Image (cartoon, rainbow, N blue to C red):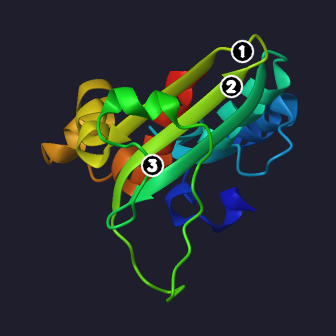
Amino acid sequence: LKLACDDKLKYCKTMSKVRYCYQVALLDYKNPNAVCPIAYDGGVQLQFQYQSFIEDMLECGGVEEVNWIKMYEGYKYPTFINKNDCKEIREIPEIELDDPFAKLKVIGYYCYAKCKNGKTYTCLMSVEEAKQWALKYSISFKKFNNGEAKSAIWNDNFETMALKTVIKSVG
């Protein structure tokens, strides 16, 4: 369905679409959003989403629990004084809003993983740090920022890519 409905994939090579479907079937993720198709050089490329990394961590047998959150401006997070304090956070707070349609500004991304051996791993990244990460490691985002490319996955799906980055950092 994604291949048929996405305008960016409309003119991609047919065999690359077939190859993408075959790869998705082989991976067999339970979450339908674990991977997505991305147009690349006239074909379709498989892009892993943060849901795939969470599923992989939980199924590998060594990770007991994974929590992640987008952090919003104006909401108080326990002990988020500096990055070292984030290691003390075990539970991700729920956000309750008076207005469920309020548009909140995302200020960062956080992930916590607890392993079966008792070790815990965390990653906290601000929006600006995520942008710097993308500029350092994403060739397409660099080209997009320089005006050399029409789009980049980091620009089109910034929050998803930032969540994926913090989740991969603890995995």
In the rendered image, the residue lying farthest to the left is: 146
Residue visible at 81% across and 18% down? 60
Quadrant for residue 107, please give it: bottom left
Residue visible at 52% across and 80% down? 97
Q: Residues within 10 Å of mark 3 (few under 14, many from 20)?
A: few
Numbered tag placed on residue 57 in the rendering: none
| Of the two numbered discs 2 and 3 in the rendering, the one whose residue sits closer to the viewer | 3
Q: Residues within 10 Å of mark 2 (few under 14, many from 20)?
A: some
Q: Residues within 10 Å of mark 1 (few under 14, many from 20)?
A: few
In this figure, which residue is indicated by the disc labeled 3?
Answer: 78
Q: Secondary structure at mark 3?
A: loop
Q: Which amino acid, mark 2?
A: Lys
> Which mark is first along the chain, 3 or 2?
3
Q: Which amino acid, mark 1?
A: Gly
Return the residue nearer the eye: 12 or 137.
137
Left or right: where 82 falls relative to 65? left
Numbered tag placed on residue 118 in the rendering: 1
| Rendered location of residue 28, percent (x, y) | 87, 35
Residue visible at 12% across and 43% down? 146
| Rendered location of residue 58, percent (x, y) | 79, 28
Quadrant for residue 144, please give it: top left
Numbered tag placed on residue 114 in the rendering: 2
Residue visible at 40% across and 56% down? 156
- Is residue 157 visible to the viewer in this orientation of the structure? no
Q: Secondary structure at mark 2?
A: strand
